[in-house]
Amino acid sequence: MRKWSSPRRKIIIIIGVLISLWLINRIFFGISFDFFAKQRLDAAKAAWENQHIRDYRMIIEVRGGFILPTQYEVTIRDNQVIDAGQRLAISLVNPDYVPSSEQFSPVPVENASQYTMDNLFSSANSKVANDAFVHINNACNRYVVDFDPRMSFVNLYANKCDGSLLGCQMRECESTYRVIELEPLSAENN
C-alpha cells in the first residue's frame, strides 16, 4: 500500500482540489477574469483614432432581450449618423434566410444614431473604466469585446448571460453588437 504523503499523491490531490474549486465556481457562480481588458480597449481605441476615419459606412447586427436580431446599415460623417436602414437578421419562417439578400428599409436617423464607433468604444469603456488590470465577470453579466485585427474597430461588444445554478434574471441576459462590415468613405463618396 502506498503512502498518502508521497509528493506525487500530494500533487494529484492539489490538482484535484483546484479543478473541483474551479468547477464549483463555474457551475454555481460563473465568475471569470479578463486581464488587461482596459489596456486592450485603450490601445484599440488609440489605433482606431490614429487612422482618422471620421466618415464610414457600417453594417451592425443588434441582438438582445426580446427583440428580433436586426441589422442596421448606417452612414457616419464626422461621428454623426447621416443615413440609416434596417433589416431583420433572421427569418421566423424561412430557415435558409440570408440577411444579405434583403435590402435595408430606411429608418429615421434618430433610430440608429447610437450606432457609431465612438459610441461602441464608449459603451465598452463603461464596463472596464474602473479596472486597473483585471475585469471580473460574473455569470449574469459577462462582458465580451473583440477588435478588428486590421483596423482596430470594435467588431463585437456583448454582455452575455452564461447563467449558473444560482441563476440570472432575464433582463440581465445577452445584448450583442456585432459589426458585420465597416467601409471607410473617401471624400468623393460623401
Image (tube, rainbow, N blue to C red):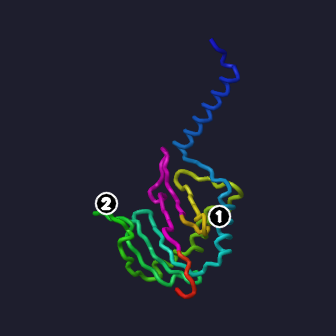
The magenta span reads: 156-182
Mark 2, residue position: 95
Crowding around mark 1 (Cα neighbors within 10 Å: few <14, some 14 to 19, many 20+) is many
Amino acid on which the number 1 mark rests in the picture: Leu
Camera-nearest residue between 82 and 111? 82
- Name above or below for residue 156 compared with residue 31: below
Which residue shows up at 66% across the image and 64% down it? 129
Compared with 135, 11 (above or below) is: above
* Figure quadrant of the N terminus: top right
Which one is in front, 64 or 83? 83
In percent of the image, x 41 and y 75: which residue is there?
86
Q: Position of residue 183 (x, y in %)?
A: 53, 75
> How far apart are the two marked residues, 1 and 2, measured between alpha carbons?
36 Å
Q: Is residue 74 magenta?
A: no
Q: Write down the residue under mark 1.
A: 41
Looking at the image, which residue is at 69% across and 61% down?
39
